[in-house]
Image (spheres, rainbow, N blue to C red):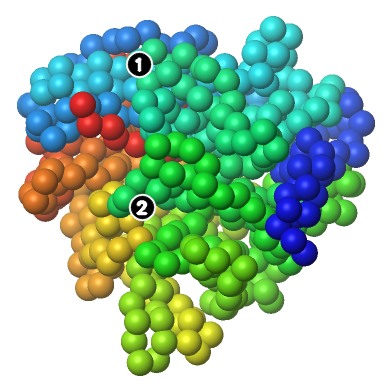
Amino acid sequence: MERRELLRLLASAGALPLFAPLARAAGTADATGGDNWQAQFEAASAPWKTGFATPANDLPLTRATVRGRFPDAVAGTLFRVGPAGHDMGGERYHHWFDGDGMVHRFVIDGADVRHQGRYVATPKRVAEVRAGRRLYETFGTMPPGGESPTSADSINVANTSVLPLQGEVLALWEGGSATRIDARTLDTLGVKTWRADLAGMPFSAHPKVDPDGTVWNFGVSSGQGLLALYEIAPEGTLRRAAVVPVADMPMVHDFAVTERHLVFLMPPLVYDNKRKEAGSTFLDAHVWRPELGMRALVVDKHDWERRQMLELPAGFLFHVGNAWEEDTPRGTLIHVDYVRSDNTDSVFISNREVMRARRVRGADPHLTVATLNLGTGKATQVALAQEAEFPRIDPRRVGLRHRQVVHATQIRPDLPGFGAVARTDVETGRSQRFSYGTQAIVEEHVFVPDGKKPGWVLGTAFDFGRQKTVLSCFAADHLAAGPVAQATLPYALPLGLHGAFVPA
């Protein structure tokens, strides 16, 4: 089928490329049984539940207490985003990923660190705040009396990641448009439309930026079995967009790029239209089909019609670290590291139960390195010892050979999330880590380059013992020695997802 025709199909699939179709009548009981999750959350005694509480308002620019001095290379702004609006009108969402997005900026200048947080004023949030209640279905919740959404962007929560681009920050979600944010004020500027005929198309939360500044991204249209592809020039203009068909469309959250290829690891968590038509949430419309294995779709960067599918053992993933390729007598090899779990407990159970302040442990995710042989069509993988999530690398090495991955680690049986940050050599498996202690939950940490020096690791953690959020900076080659500087906010932020650093 011609690309033009595929684009037409995706655009005309209506307004709901991700959540279509809806057959649920307004007012129907939700799929989780109608429990009073808000009351359960309020009654829970877990000291970490503040990380999943709802800030009543935006957070004004506030100066942190700083210990030490942040290096000159870290002068700039760390932007972060995550789910924050978890309840409204006495009703609480039933999944962490449902919450309205709040975008944060940490302005760093030596011994001075200031923080500001603002809800992203998406059409969904504006309408629901005005109504004083939840109006629409989300990823994992059907609120009572909810209305059928009119478009994907009418239910866009802009809560997953950020992409700094041409002086703005794009707040990203899985199923609809990117949302433009003013980098200086965090004002919401409206949706980003790359081209008029692409308005409302899914633009995913994990774009990759080549060393030359080219931005690559994708979007999933689950109901139509289509994968959208984007190439964006460094100056922020769209170069190309097309869609390709994918049978048994899975939940795909992240991908990787190499010098010549786009790489999609597709877990066997497959979208089922019939379940959605019967009234399931978008999440519950997915079925675990391990017989499909983990499919690896490799797409030529220059010719999107050249595609190859390889297979790995069945497993689930959210995030990919990096990929790189080498030409050998056996063919082109692509090496890709990602965070693999044996099953889907994290998305179906763990990240639901935290909305009731319950800790339910799922399968432990581990850093895993896969090798895809494009010559033989065979794929292999090796799991490393490190428990891991939120993998990040030196941004200058995207798509190129790398060794070091920064990630969260140290799973605690009594806490959600992780307790330490680590830097692991994916070739040798050697790893160093810093533990934040028994009363902290670690968020994503990013790598900040510093010329030819080893660089820095920068990230946040929720100290629930003090009910405060801390921002820490580590020397990348001496991570275990602890932070060289740390800024403590006078309050706790809701636990978030992803971020990006922009130098001053």
Count the labels in the image: 2
Q: Is residue 181 left or right of residue 442?
A: right
Label 1 – label 2 distance at C-alpha: 25 Å
Residue 202 has which mark? none
Identify whether 115 is placed above or below 231. Answer: above
Residue lying at 78% horizontally and 47% vertically, measured from the top left: 8
Residue lying at 43% horizontally and 60% vertically, measured from the top left: 257
Few, some or many residues within 10 Å of mark 1 (<14, 14–19, 20+): few
Write down the residue under mark 1: 184
Q: In the rendered image, which quarter contains the N terminus? A: bottom right
Mark 1, secondary structure of its residue: loop
Q: Is residue 36 left or right of residue 341?
A: right
Identify whether 49 is placed above or below 262. Answer: above
Precedes in sequence: disc 1 or disc 2: 1
Identify whether 300 is placed above or below 352. Answer: below
Q: Position of residue 328 (x, y in %)?
A: 34, 87
Q: Quadrant of residue 108?
A: top left
Q: Position of residue 405 (x, y in %)?
A: 28, 57
Q: Position of residue 292 (x, y in %)?
A: 67, 74
Amino acid found under the numbered disc labelled 1: Arg
Q: In the rendered image, which quarter contains the C terminus? A: top left
Q: Quadrant of residue 44?
A: top right
Residue lying at 58% horizontally and 53% vertically, measured from the top left: 229
Inspect this view and state whether residue 68 appears.
yes
Residue 210 has which mark? 2
| Pair 1/2: label in front | 2
Mark 2, secondary structure of its residue: loop
Amino acid found under the numbered disc labelled 2: Asp
Q: Position of residue 436 (x, y in %)?
A: 24, 40
Q: Nearer the viewer, residue 399 or 82?
A: 399
Residue lying at 39% horizontally and 79% vertically, measured from the top left: 333
